[in-house]
Amino acid sequence: MKLFDVYPLFDVTIDHGKGCYVYDDKNQEYLDFYGGHAVISIGHGHPKYLQTMQEQAAKLVFYSNAVKNPLQAKLAAKLGPVCGYDDYQLFLINSGAEANENALKLASFYTGKKKVIAFSHAFHGRTSAAVNVTQNPKIQAPINATFPVDFFELEDIEGVKASIAQGDVAAVIIEGISGVGGIHVPSVGFMQELRKVTAENNVVLILDEIQSGYGRSGKFFAHQWYGIQPDLITMAKGIANGYPFAGVLISPKFAPVYGQLGTTFGGNHLGCALACTVLDVIQEEHLVENAAKQGDYLMNGLKSITIPGLKELRGKGLMIGIEFDYPYKEVRNRLLYDQHVFTGAAGTSTLRILPPLCIQQKECDLFFERFEKALKK
Ligand SMILES: Cc1ncc(COP(=O)(O)O)c(C=O)c1O
């Protein structure tokens, strides 16, 4: 049987990983400044993570959501104070798209309305509602256009206000920092106005923190830089350091209804145990603070390097975009194949830097050295 060939692949086979490094099948070491797409939070092969994996797998990997699972309550109790939303409720699923799918459904159940406001260049996932609020016709099938969506450019608060004034908007969905769109950090003023206008009109504000959350921006959630409190927060990627797991944080104003949401695998025993260990490590190793510190170091270091054709450096914490005025492809390939550094990318001209949250100055310095070499043709 052949694989369904939808991924353009790098000619590299990653075999194992340790900390901020991954190794291919010939044992070549690579500096991981991609984190497997912002997924690796506490680092590859963390001993505590491996211990939890072994112990919980030996005990129980999965049992149905039809029975009590104290590990879900344990995770919620740990997460509340760490993320600053102790009074919110937690619903667990398996992927980022599913988190947004459920958040959009909740907003529609709550308001009884259908229309959603989203932003151009945002990415919210590939399931039906999530892809319908992602303005990319290439990944939308005809069956995905199931509800009306008004798209606006980031910062276009007047457009948003005019749309909300029509009275038929259920939700606004926005990323804490746009990832796939090329690392765009919204302004504090825009986000505060957005919170104000949604609250005043009973429109649900959904913050997609799937990529920007879990410490990556240097605060637990990126929206905490803007001093706002959303109604729903979606999270995935770093939550279980590579084990498929995701969640929605739900404000107390939403009352749960039996059977309204549900999932087979979401909140399974192994995932909950791993997510608890990830939170423990994030706290014990001060990884949110480390993301802020190393992010500043990276940003300052990048500013001091002469980058030919640099258009803009953007980001917060360990979510950095380097936009060139030419396609990134050759630089990214030289980084990977010659310098052995993994990076992410966005569009055709932005490199995305998304390392594990545990990187140290040593790894940043190594990145500067190799990046400077890769910039030379
Ligand atoms: C901001 C954002 N939202 C949603 C998703 C979708 O997550 P998943 O691929 O886990 O469904 C992604 C994935 O890259 C993302 O970056």
Image: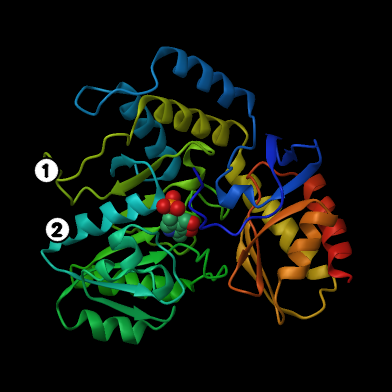
Q: Amino acid at mark 1?
A: Val
SS type, badge 2: helix
Q: Residue 122 or 233: which is nearer the viewer?
A: 122
Q: Which circle marks residue 110 in the picture? A: 2
Hey, which residue is sitting farthest top in the picture? Answer: 59
Residue 201, quarter of picture: bottom left
Q: Is residue 53 left or right of residue 12?
A: left
**Residue 309 percent coordinates (x, y):** 78, 81
Q: Which circle marks residue 257 in the picture? A: 1
> Within 10 angstroms of label 2, few (less than 14), some, or many (20 or more) residues?
some
Q: CA distance from mark 2 to mark 1?
A: 11 Å
Residue at 84% in and 54% down: 339
Q: Which circle marks residue 195 in the picture? A: none
Q: Is residue 257 visible?
A: yes
Q: Is residue 376 left or right of residue 67?
A: right
**Residue 212 percent coordinates (x, y):** 50, 56
Q: Is residue 136 visible?
A: no
Q: Amino acid at mark 2?
A: Tyr
Hey, which residue is sitting farthest front in the picture? Answer: 1
Residue 8, quarter of picture: bottom right
